Amino acid sequence: MAYQSEREEIEHKKFVDYKDVVYLRQFTNAHAKIMAKKRTGVSASRQREIANAIKRARYMALLPYLSA
């Protein structure tokens, strides 16, 4: 779960890039599933951007579809 300081840091990032794997891993759980908006605490538009970036990173083999 993201705390207030983490949420502010997340919200201030201007562009969600699919190549920024370290940033995107904050939004996946141990089983490599995308966490819900309630858990991450970001806005709906930002959550959609993050979800699209994660899906794109998975397609480019930067993130796993499943954890081993």
Image (cartoon, rainbow, N blue to C red):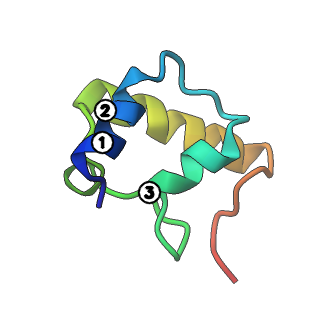
Image coordinates of residue 66 in percent, x first then y, are: 63, 72
Q: Which numbered disc flags the more N-terminal residue, 3 or 1?
A: 1
* Residue labelled with disc 2: 8
- Residue at position x 70%, y 83% from top? 68
Few, some or many residues within 10 Å of mark 2 (<14, 14–19, 20+): few
Which residue lies most toward the front here?
A: 5
Q: Is mark 1 on a helix, strand or loop?
A: helix
Q: How far apart are marks 2 and 1 (CA)?
A: 5 Å
Which residue lies most toward the bottom here?
A: 68
Give the image quarter of residue 36: bottom left
Give the image quarter of residue 35: bottom left
Few, some or many residues within 10 Å of mark 1 (<14, 14–19, 20+): few
* Residue labelled with disc 1: 5
Q: Which numbered disc flags the more N-terminal residue, 3 or 2?
A: 2
Whether tag 2 and tag 1 are in contact, CB under 8 A, the answer is yes
Q: Is mark 3 on a helix, strand or loop?
A: loop
42 or 3, nearer to the observer: 3
* Kind of residue at disc 3: Ile
- Residue at position x 69%, y 50% from top? 58
* Residue labelled with disc 3: 34
9 left or right, relative to 59: left
